[in-house]
Amino acid sequence: MKNAVTRLGNITIVGLKAIFRNKLRSFLTMLGIVIGVGCVIVVVAIGNGATQSIQETINSLGSNFIMIFPGAATQSGARIFTGQSTMTVEDADAIKAECPSVAYVSVIMRTAGQAVAGELNWGTSVMGVGVDWPFIRAWNLSDGQFFTDADVRSAAKVCVIGQTVADNLFPQGAAVGQIVRIKNVPFKVVGVLEKKGGNTMGQDQDDQIVAPYTTVMKRLMGQTKVNMIQAAARNATGVQQAMTEIEGLLRQRHRIPPGGDSDFMMRSQEEIAQANEQQMKILRTLLLSIAAISLVIGGIGIMNIMLVSVTERTREIGIRMAIGAKGRHVLLQFLFEAITLSIVGGLIGVLAGIGVSALAAKLSGWPIVVSPMSIAISFGVAGAVGIAFGFFPALKASHLDPIDALRYE
Amino acid sequence: MARAVIEIHSLTKVYSMGEVEVRALAGVDLLVEEGDFVAIMGPSGSGKSTLMNIVGCLDRPTSGTYLLDGIDVSTLNRDQRAVIRNAKIGFVFQSFNLLARTSALENVELPMLYGELGLTRGQRRQAALDSLHRVGLAGRENNQPSQLSGGQQQRVAIARALVTNPAILLADEPTGNLDSRTSEEIMGIFQQLNDDGKTVVLITHEPDIAQHARRIVHVRDGLIQSDQRIEQVRVAGKGIAPPVAATAATRVSP
């Protein structure tokens, strides 16, 4: 037994020496595995990160969040927007008044503009909302107060700004009470929103200014048609009920005959998250198949080099056999070489994968989570590839006839 | 009378090449005693190489018996022959057959890596150093084959053949790739080893080289044609301490 261990150790030495004798070739042989394993780790890390951030978004929005867009959703799910929104402020009020399962409703107006404060300016998005909006989004203020119902009714020139806007326009702090000019309209800052970070799509949710929708309609956009209505059901289990109530009410208000297409479309946060998840899944599957193909190509690369190596080292094999190497020794040596190449390649791939993941996390700002599982699996696969693709060349080497091998030029 | 190391009786080897059968050996009897120095001669196609392959346990005879150091090796399988080659036979080849990009020391250690003795690293190293010392290459153990002359490479090969203390040294045209002066030196080493009691079997087609042996066996058409003792053995150079060792030593310590 001790002998067997010693001998296995000897084979290991023999194999390692052979690898180090051909450093450049060994490295090039590994490259396929390096890329394959690296790919797997990066892909899984990005996938995990995306999943996690989607989950976080769901949590931050609350699962009872509902969006109502103007425009028809056809049977196929495609959204047709004819250009003119048919949703009105009155629709939002009616939802609030008549749908018992709905707790909060807000009109949403979206525009963008250059915000100026003193000598500083910052291009950002401007959102017009109602007083329910902080409750729908479960979004607290870090400073000041949200504008009031009276502000909305009187279309007051007040606003609440996101943390990113506050950082850029009022770097020394104390934004509340200051004046921000948007499209030359002076808005008084009454509050600063708590920091929320990026959303699912990677957009910075703190880079926005929120003002009463009445003010945004009149002063900034000059339109009364509503971009979107956001609502929140009383609780998570009531989302479906709330959506049914809203649909019935709006169809009635918009005089849509039974069987006719609605001129609006609803999405719950859960549906949006699911759609995102689905997209991520497709992307992940795609990238993982590329990684798998790359691993197989890496394996074929190893097999190719090992076959070349066996032919090129026929003489060496003959010498080894003449001085007492059994077929098994030669088989193990070449197999060991192949496995070492793929394992070392796998190791470099793991390091490269972690490195690239970290870089991607830094550049994209996404949360990227390297999973120990993906490291273990890709490493195992790399080893398996080494065994699978190294076996044939090793077998070929071990079956050489020593006399022929010695004469090989 | 000394013990027989090689005992061959009615040995035949037939190669079938498609329809045609070639009788490479047609019934050979050969007895080599311990401590002998035999040169096997013969023109190409005589069956000399086939005999050397069988004596070296690289190949199996078609019929007949072959006892090597008292063991019947004529019926052994591949792996069993590998073990015998490792333990009983030290090969020296015409083209040296050292592993490239591998130091002299590691080349000499190689047979021990495949051996059944289970030597430790230190033991292997020491044995290899001793063996290199014996062939006059002390101080050259870290040189790779490409950094050594032909004569020095062949010395490394001889050290490798010696390191497992085999029953026979089997040298196949060991001077074929060397100039006459270096050939003399190499033959001097074989003679010295033989004087120390090592059995040497030399395959050559050069009569000058064969004259260094104690006995010459001529092979022709697969049969032994003649088998004679040499009255006057040709002593290589000054015999022992070959001059290359001296130059090697001066080069190492300037």
Image (cartoon, coloured by chain):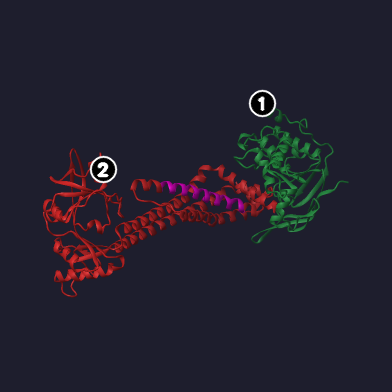
Chain colours: A red, B green
* Secondary structure at numbered mark 1: loop
Mark 2: few/some/many CA within 10 Å (<14, 14-19, 20+): some
Front residue of B178 and B41:
B178
Front residue of A175 and A52:
A175
Residue drawn at 31 percent across, 68 percent down: A237
Q: Is residue A335 magenta?
A: yes
Front residue of A85 and A96:
A96
Residue B206 location in percent, x, y?
A: 73, 40
Residue at the disc numbered 2: A167
Tell me which amino acid carries mark 1: Ser
Tell me which amino acid carries mark 2: Asp
Residue A239 location in percent, x, y?
A: 28, 67
Which of label 2 and label 1 is nearer to you? 2
Please give left or right for residue B131 compared with residue A218 in the image: right
Q: Which residues are magenta?
A: A331-356
Up the image or down, B69 lies above or below A226; here it is: above
Query: Dot 2 falls on which chain?
Result: A
The residue most toward the right is B1
Residue at the disc numbered 1: B253
Residue drawn at 64 percent across, 60 percent down: B18
Please give left or right for residue A296 compared with residue B27 in the image: left
Up the image or down, A201 lies above or below A64; here it is: above
